[in-house]
Amino acid sequence: MLVPLTKLSCPAYQCFHALKIKKNYLPLCATRWSSTSTVPQITTHYTIYPRDKDKRWEGVNMERFAEEADVVIVGAGPAGLSAAVRLKQLAAAHEKDIRVCLVEKAAQIGAHTLSGACLDPAAFKELFPDWKEKGAPLNTPVTEDRFGILTEKYRIPVPILPGLPMNNHGNYIVRLGHVVSWMGEQAEALGVEVYPGYAAAEVLFHDDGSVKGIATNDVGIQKDGAPKLWVIDEKNWKPGRVDHTVGWPLDRHTYGGSFLYHLNEGEPLVALGLVVGLDYQNPYLSPFREFQRWKHHPSIRPTLEGGKRIAYGARALNEGGFQSIPKLTFPGGLLIGCSPGFMNVPKIKGTHTAMKSGILAAESIFNQLTSENLQSKTIGLHVTEYEDNLKNSWVWKELYSVRNIRPSCHGVLGVYGGMIYTGIFYWILRGMEPWTLKHKGSDFERLKPAKDCTPIEYPKPDGQISFDLLSSVALSGTNHEHDQPAHLTLRDDSIPVKRNLSIYDGPEQRFCPAGVYEFVPVEQGDGFRLQINAQNCVHCKTCDIKDPSQNINWVVPEGGGGPAYNGM
């Protein structure tokens, strides 16, 4: 999010100078899932239990440090950094003094960045025309492009015709975390003030309702208040190869697919992963374990045999596309990057569109900040021209052209129906068909009760190609300050057992790719309780999206916590 203001007042840091405070739906299958009458308290976060109603906070002095800036950018991803860089480029070209601050919850720029990634360089080249001279880490141009449909034992090759979304000619296979880190260096060189380790936790407002700024979260409060990178055998290494598949191990009604990218980084590295649409219906499905099963396919396993996994991570992708883009501007701020849903879903690419949105946002903000005839109805500037500029850009045209591909997978043929639709309508009409298909609703609404579904029996990991969850999470470098309130908050502590476990067999223990949620026996009596292992969280936010009761609310933990991806 960008917050443009003529003069912005925002707390850039909050410090706590007091002593730490100590703290002391109709259920089904009741005989199996019943719990004690007293629900153990799970959530202690101030967003659920406000401090103004907590007697322990009476008389506590919370000192806050405030900073003012012209533009504050939340999140140092490709879009945020693009906006910051472009603003400073424009300021230098027009000899204007604009203070740009960028806050990032990761301890280091790029540490929370996770992507395959096969990068369309259009926006990157626009922002950095001299990127080669500056040593940008785009080292692996795509040299081979393959697509296939997997059955349980075979791979059916599918030709990639010119003009189809999956054509990667001219793209680069990159470690996006390294690209983001490099962009951070360029931003700082231009004078952007970059603050890693600061998590934006709250939006501040002027009296007129416009956005004033952001507040970082508090620190010093006690606890109670699927992609991987592998090093493979060199004989299996094909630098520049891009491999995508659909089909097994997912059924036709479960949207998803895989990627396997061969990097050219001086050693035989591959990045691989499985994407699973969160509108899946079977609560017994585990995206992580589907990924482990996929690696054993006869067309995938040979690449990994003799290799070694060196990293692991997970994230959720905004795949709603054109139909799901919200209003992008509001008084005092605007939305850029992945959050509004600028990903080209059939391409499985969003970095280029995210960067372009940041560039357009910077240009729109700069025009208003430097206007001699600036007139604003609110203290926080409402930069409406950003949305107009975006709609007139290639980003809007690209997203519009592929708008019907993802919704077309909801028919009786599922994913294969979507492939047929793409082949007929997109390849021939290039997205100009005179209709727009709709999505089927929110992802959490698609989950069926456990009694209506068949449990999935997953094979045990062999420790060579497939692995258990916790040893994988250990490779993400995830770390949080243990003694802080859990940032996975529950609106009602009783719902996980009374509703999710009784009706859906506790899907949170499967859809989480980091083992954060467990149902464990209660200490006294019969039944189960939900245990939240917040220190395992890799910040994918899947739980906030897929929870069938919409009871989980993901909030930012203390800045600097979370995964520490090394060029994922």
Image (cartoon, grey):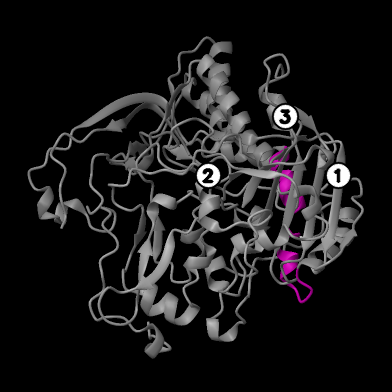
Q: Residue furthest left?
A: 59
Q: Is residue 396 left or right of residue 14?
A: right
- Dot 1 surroundings within 10 Å: few (below 14), some, or many (20 or more)? some
Q: Quadrant of residue 270?
A: top right
What percent of the width, then of the height, locates residue 510? 53, 66
Mark 2 Cα-neighbour bin, 10 Å: few <14, some 14–19, many ≥20: many
Q: Position of residue 474 (x, y in %)?
A: 50, 47
**As shown in the figure, which amino acid type bears the numbered disc 1?**
Asp
Question: Magenta stretch containing residue 315, yes or no?
Answer: no
The numbered mark at residue 99 is none
Rendered residue at 72%/27% (across/down): 138
Q: Nearer the viewer, mark 1 or mark 2?
A: 2
Considering every residue shown, the one lying at the far top of the view is 95
Residue behind mark 1: 145
Image location (x, y in percent) of residue 207: 28, 41
Of pointers 2 and 3, the one earlier in the residue sequence: 3
Q: Which mark is residue 476?
A: 2
The magenta segment: 394-414
**Above or below, 216 relative to 319:** above
Q: Are marks 3 and 1 in contact (CB under 8 Å)?
A: no
Would residue 442 be seen by someone viewing this image from the given angle?
no
Q: Is residue 161 left or right of residue 542?
A: right
Query: SS for tag 2?
Result: loop
Q: Which residue is mark 3?
A: 265
Q: Is residue 29 above or below residue 189?
A: below
Look at 48% across and 60% down and name the residue there: 543
Amino acid on which disc 2 is placed = Ser
